[in-house]
Amino acid sequence: MGMYCFGIDVGGTTVKCGLFTTDGTLVEKWEIPTRTENEGSSILPDVAQTIKQKIEEMGLDMANIDGVGIGIPGPVNEKGEVPVAVNLHWSFKAVASELAALTGLPAKAGNDANVAALGEAWKGAAAGSRSVLMLTLGTGVGGGVIVDGKIVSGAHGSAGEVGHAHVNREETIACNCGNFGCLEQYCSATGIARLARERVKDYAGETVLKQFYEDGTLDAKAVFDAYKDEDPAAIEIVEKAADILGNAVAVFCAVLDPETIVIGGGVSRAGKVLTDIIQKAYVKYAFTPCKTTPIVIASLGNNAGIYGAARMVLND
Amino acid sequence: MGMYCFGIDVGGTTVKCGLFTTDGTLVEKWEIPTRTENEGSSILPDVAQTIKQKIEEMGLDMANIDGVGIGIPGPVNEKGEVPVAVNLHWSFKAVASELAALTGLPAKAGNDANVAALGEAWKGAAAGSRSVLMLTLGTGVGGGVIVDGKIVSGAHGSAGEVGHAHVNREETIACNCGNFGCLEQYCSATGIARLARERVKDYAGETVLKQFYEDGTLDAKAVFDAYKDEDPAAIEIVEKAADILGNAVAVFCAVLDPETIVIGGGVSRAGKVLTDIIQKAYVKYAFTPCKTTPIVIASLGNNAGIYGAARMVLND
């Protein structure tokens, strides 16, 4: 094993880069812009160049570098190939092999949500757990599955796509994916805002959320702020979303039985009130041996991706 | 790698035993009784003895034997320890290490449903698939999860306990596990019989199932036989169970995205009509990239356990 590795997290506007020691210490962190023009053909060369610059700047010996891991916003198969990544303007790209050729270093690629889960399992909220289920509650609901310390990619790169677990047969509005009744329609920031609008619209009692509704600013943050102030409408909305989410997590755990469940994404900024209310619902629905599985808030924030990417290139 | 390995499948009344070549050919298959008296203290010594006899009888060289794998009807952790196995009258038992000590061979232990899934992934209906979700529809609903060619045991030995996925908030009758609304309350042989009784009880039209209901012999086999004859009540019952099951499998696949889904257990004797109707429901609820995942009937029958047990002791 070498002494260093690189972790790269490619987003639609910036590429986050990290140089790590192989014990998981973040030595340096920087960003470069994501150049999506010309079908994103500059993205991997730009990544390779910034890595080479860092190696030179730090005076590192190539023999001491284990490799470079990279997280991509799109499905990634087990060979590190991406069939399509809309936000990067990519069609098929053999990311891992191209990046290895460009850098002269061993390279691995993974889906960004899966890679973030691996980061949390390595040095974040689930550090020490060999198996982790992570849910990322943001604009949508993403996720990642770690089994035996490794990312589960899935046969179609769709493992951990928990936001598209079908949880409601009665839904009449389509999810972005085309199905009706996906988890992310209720438990993403967007989904919680929608549940809130539906509830507040004709709410008979007093609630601070009415003003937000009328101003058109009723979002998940407003709901959780009101929830912390014990607003009755906010309590109803949060309990409904948490009940749907807790039930879904219980079902996922009947399949996977992970050591730790991690909740990340923008909605997770609500903090412990969020995990408390999810745990309450989870315990109601979970299979008995799994009822004690801890549900924790992600701790690496935006750095989870570079940590997980770096971890990918290390052996056990 | 040696040339031989043993696969053992411990049931409540008999222990199935198999001698395999390491390429997966079943050389010999036999059974011994399961002696559950004295807290099942004879079970592992009996297994060790029958293995030693077989080695002597066949004139095998210990150096040519990779080891012995054993499937247990109970939770098994990653060290091959069993906290409790009710049907064997066991409390805690370090199965893998005891069996290794008794036989002088490397030994591994796994939960019987997980081990059967590994058997199907090795030489059965999912042969060639590195990731498999198996559901066993019998008296209850069990299951197993294979990722990257290996059993996923779970933090509490409960991975693959898909029968206790919570699928119905409205349920008022308790599952054996104590929860309300588990998958096995609808999709096991028992669950299908219950759905049938509820539907046939006050069914207004003509159905052959009425006679079974009145005779007290309305079971899952009667329902599927009538379904194949296009009996209208049977069609309703089977479609309802398949819809619940297809939805649940779609949710499991949003987490795992396996290459192949295998349906085993007594109910699977209904054959292709069963997978056809499950697939129809599955496709409706599955995340788009997973809609094409094949759903197949298990092919190893009662031998799945010995195949999977043998596979456990082989390296990739």
Image (spheres, coloured by chain):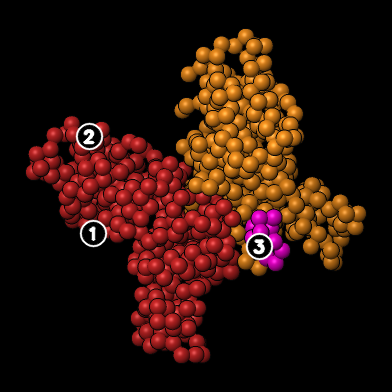
Chain colours: A orange, B red
Q: Report the mark closest to the observer, 1 or 3.
A: 3
Report which residue position mark 2 lands on: B2
Task: Work out whether disc 1 and disc 2 sit on a shared chain.
Answer: yes
* Magenta-colored span: A171-182
- Pick whichever of labels 1 and 2 is earlier in the sequence: 2
Front position in the image: A140 or A243: A140
* Residue A102 visible to an observer of this rendering: yes
In whole angstroms, how far apart are the C-alphas of marks 2 and 3? 52 Å
Count residues near mark 2 (Cα–Cα under 10 Å), then give few for <14, some for 14-19, many for 20+: some
What type of secondary structure mainly makes up the magenta span? loop
Above or below residue B74? Residue A153 is above
Report which residue position mark 1 lands on: B13
Q: Residue A236: image x %, image y %?
A: 74, 59
Q: Is residue A175 magenta?
A: yes
* Residue A251 visible to an observer of this rendering: no
Q: Residue B260: image x %, image y %?
A: 44, 53
In whole angstroms, how far apart are the C-alphas of marks 1 and 3? 47 Å
Q: Mark 1 lies on which chain?
A: B
Count residues near mark 3 (Cα–Cα under 10 Å), then give few for <14, some for 14-19, many for 20+: many
Residue A193 quadrant:
bottom right
Q: Residue at x 46, y 74 (%)?
A: B238
Which image quarter holds the C terminus of chain B?
top left
Q: Which residue is drawn at 38% across and 61% down?
A: B297
Amino acid carrying mark 2 in the image: Gly
Q: What element carries label 2?
A: loop
Amino acid carrying mark 3 in the image: Phe
Task: Work out whether disc 1 and disc 3 sit on a shared chain.
Answer: no
Q: Mark 3 lies on which chain?
A: A
For residue B95, the mark is: none
